[in-house]
């Protein structure tokens, strides 16, 4: 018997245009209405703030006792999620959806508690203010001057089955504040946060958010427009750029894509400290993260936007000086001049940097160097100690014809070999030893470290300078080669893992094409199948598509006779090798999956009829 699939709970949100709009009152009133209709309703958490009319609504409703959480010597009350799950009502009332839970709780945020209840099939009625929506928090902070630290992801709020905006108008709310706040506090509140223009702007933002998010059950708004690309940057307003991009995406009912451009330095570079936070914010806003490599940032962003068929591009304004832009060019200016049909939005910084001079000249964080193998380092030190002396001694019989310059050129080979084997430190030692050996054997007076001729001093100084530069350059190239090999091995491993995941997962061919295009940053991916004398397209992502597999720059055969073709203007030979690794692993994974299916269903359609026992008469 197939077990019945548990339904997903429904979320009903009351969205307050501002604090004191009556969210808790509306929450409890809705709970009493549902209970009067025969529903099984409990109160998970409700903050009445001592208001008699709000507290009276709790009477008659079952309240799940809160649990105590100790933090820094103080006991806090939080919603008891396990108790609610055990009680399993039809509906639970949860106040203050954006509330941050005291450390030590089941989750970090209350909306995560609600998410668990919804996954358990329990309907939830909850509430939050407009300024606590992730995409509107920056605008609310800029408008009111008060930091918003507790937010709810737009994707979660937009998945509600119903959202009601609570807005009694600016004047009505100000009158309520004047009546309910104690004398002195009310005047300060009305002159600050609750100014009429602030309340009107928050109300407008709430109405716009509701209009922009058409709700369809728990599936969220349907995305119909072309995607919107937001460039990720390390400035403090990077999160602000993403939030504004989310607003544009909601208005256009489009997908938000955050793209990060990584410079192809080839060196070991840790991930920027700000990138993880912006990736997390992008996920909370319902967007997709993409990362590409490009030396020309402007062209890389535009190329990605064109490949995704984006209609809008969201950028943060630069804080670079005019002198820097005069020397290196303006990324924003180049993007605007070459954007063609893409609409470019420039998002101004929230505030200027507090210390512009120190920020401008701050040194980048020290990067972790690639370590050379121990045997190579040992060989480098042996060469550094022995090779310069051996070369100068071997060249001593030819001193009169070779001269100091010729000897120093030969010693430079020892510095090069030491750097190639052991890195910069053995190369530095080889430079010093070669300098002293050449002075001892090839400068007048011979067999001493004294130098009588100025031309010999110049020659030795030039040798030391060239040897130091050569050693440093060779050290960098040697370490870069090792890092390149490591990166290639990691890329091969990731390609195999991704192929295995696609082959063994439930994804269809269209899903595979889309995932492959995003993973390798391709222009188009398609799966062709033979249809008579021609070909038919089974799945496709991106464009333009070739008419036949033979017209594609890269193709590979999949199981079942299908042909996977890939097209990309940035597809290099190294990319092709990596893609062949990916396709090989994908094909093997599909074959393993097919064999596993045959072994589990020996009488299935994939089993050869000759292997079946003959029917009994």
Image (spheres, rainbow, N blue to C red):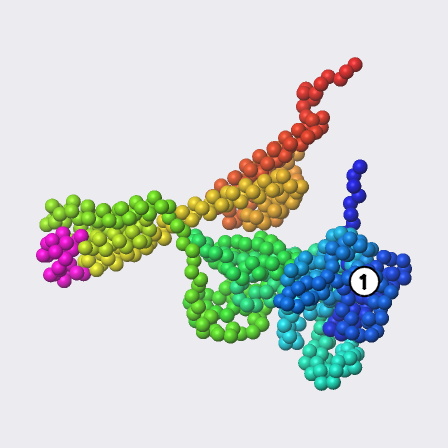
Q: In terms of image quadrants, where is residue 145? A: bottom right
Which residue is at the front of the view, 232 or 478? 478
What is the quadrant of the C terminus in the image?
top right
In magenta segment, residue 457 = yes
Q: Residue 206, relative to residue 518: is it above or below?
A: below
Give left or right: position of 225 versus 329: right
In magenta segment, residue 368 = no
Q: Residue 310, relative to residue 95: is it above or below?
A: above
Q: Secondary structure at mark 1?
A: strand
Give left or right: position of 208 versus 557: right
Give left or right: position of 13 versus 402: right
What is the quadrant of the N terminus in the image?
top right
Residue at horizontal 82%, vertical 60%?
Answer: 42
Which residue is at the front of the view, 285 or 104? 104
Q: List x then y, in percent, for residue 9.
A: 78, 54
Give left or right: position of 265 versus 597: left
Residue at horizontal 48%, vertical 66%?
Answer: 330
Q: List x then y, in percent, for residue 74.
A: 66, 68
Q: Is any atom of residue 229 visible in this view?
A: no
Residue at horizontal 50%, vertical 57%?
Answer: 271
Q: Is any atom of residue 143 visible in this view?
A: yes
Magenta residues? Answer: 437-458
Q: List x then y, in percent, for residue 150.
A: 66, 67
Which residue is at the front of the view, 329 or 272? 272
Which residue is at the front of the view, 564 or 582? 582
Q: How many marks?
A: 1
Q: List x then y, in percent, for residue 448.
A: 12, 56
Q: In terms of image quadrants, where is residue 461? A: bottom left
What residue does disc 1 label? 63
Q: Residue 235, relative to residue 175: is it above or below?
A: above
């Amino acid at each position: 018997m197939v077990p019945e699939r548990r339904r997903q709970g429904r979320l009903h949100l009351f969205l307050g245009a501002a604090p004191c709009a009556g969210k808790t009152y509306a929450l409890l009133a809705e709970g009493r209405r549902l209970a009067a209709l025969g529903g099984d309703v409990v109160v998970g958490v409700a903050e009445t703030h001592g208001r008699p009319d709000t507290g009276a609504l709790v009477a008659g409703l079952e309240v799940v006792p809160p649990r105590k959480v100790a933090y820094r010597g103080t006991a806090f009350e939080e919603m008891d999620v396990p108790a609610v799950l055990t009680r399993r009502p039809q509906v639970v009332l949860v106040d203050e959806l954006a509330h941050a839970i005291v450390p030590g709780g089941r989750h970090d945020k209350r909306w995560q508690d609600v998410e668990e209840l919804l996954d358990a099939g329990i309907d939830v009625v909850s509430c939050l203010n407009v300024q606590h929506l992730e995409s509107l928090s920056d605008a609310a902070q800029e408008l009111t001057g008060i930091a918003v630290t507790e937010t709810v992801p737009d994707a979660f709020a937009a998945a509600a089955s119903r959202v009601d905006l609570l807005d009694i108008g600016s004047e009505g709310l100000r009158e309520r504040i004047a009546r309910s706040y104690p004398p002195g506090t009310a005047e300060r509140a009305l002159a600050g946060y609750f100014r009429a223009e602030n309340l009107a702007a928050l109300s407008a933002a709430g109405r716009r958010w509701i209009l922009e998010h058409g709700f369809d059950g728990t599936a969220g708004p349907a995305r119909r427009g072309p995607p919107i690309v937001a460039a990720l940057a390390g400035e403090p307003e990077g999160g602000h750029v993403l939030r504004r991009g989310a607003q544009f995406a909601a208005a256009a009912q489009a997908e938000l894509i955050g793209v990060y451009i990584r410079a192809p330095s080839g060196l070991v570079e840790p991930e920027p400290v700000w990138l993880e936070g912006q990736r997390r914010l992008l996920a909370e806003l319902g967007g997709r993260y993409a990362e590409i490599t490009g030396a020309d940032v402007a062209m890389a962003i535009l190329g990605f936007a064109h490949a995704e068929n984006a209609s809008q591009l969201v950028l943060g304004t630069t804080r670079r000086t005019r002198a820097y832009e005069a020397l290196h060019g303006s990324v924003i200016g180049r993007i605007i001049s070459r954007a063609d049909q893409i609409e470019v939005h420039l998002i101004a910084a929230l505030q200027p940097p507090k210390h512009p001079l120190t920020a401008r000249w701050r040194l980048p964080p020290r990067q972790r160097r690639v370590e050379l193998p121990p045997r190579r380092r040992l060989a480098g030190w042996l060469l550094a100690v022995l090779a310069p002396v051996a070369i100068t001694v071997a060249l001593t019989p030819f001193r009169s014809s070779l001269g100091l310059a010729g000897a120093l050129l030969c010693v430079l080979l020892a510095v090069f070999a030491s750097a190639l084997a052991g890195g910069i430190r053995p190369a530095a030692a080889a430079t010093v030893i070669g300098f002293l050996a050449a002075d001892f054997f090839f400068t007048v007076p011979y067999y001493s470290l004294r130098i009588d001729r100025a031309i010999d001093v110049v020659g030795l100084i030039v040798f030391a300078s060239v040897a130091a530069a050569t050693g440093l350059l060779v050290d960098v190239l040697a370490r870069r080669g090792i890092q390149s090999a490591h990166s290639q091995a990691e890329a091969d491993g990731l390609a195999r893992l991704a192929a295995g995941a696609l082959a063994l997962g439930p994804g269809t061919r269209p899903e595979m094409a889309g995932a492959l295009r995003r993973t390798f940053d391709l222009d188009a991916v398609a799966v062709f199948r033979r249809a008579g004398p021609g070909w038919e397209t089974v799945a496709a992502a991106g464009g333009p598509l070739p008419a036949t597999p033979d017209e594609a720059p890269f193709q590979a055969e999949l199981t079942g006779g299908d042909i996977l073709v890939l097209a990309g203007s940035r597809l290099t030979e190294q990319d092709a090798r990596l893609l062949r690794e990916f396709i090989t692993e994908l094909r093997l994974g599909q074959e393993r999956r097919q064999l596993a299916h045959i072994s589990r269903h020996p009488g299935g359609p994939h089993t050869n009829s000759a292997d079946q026992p003959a029917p009994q008469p």
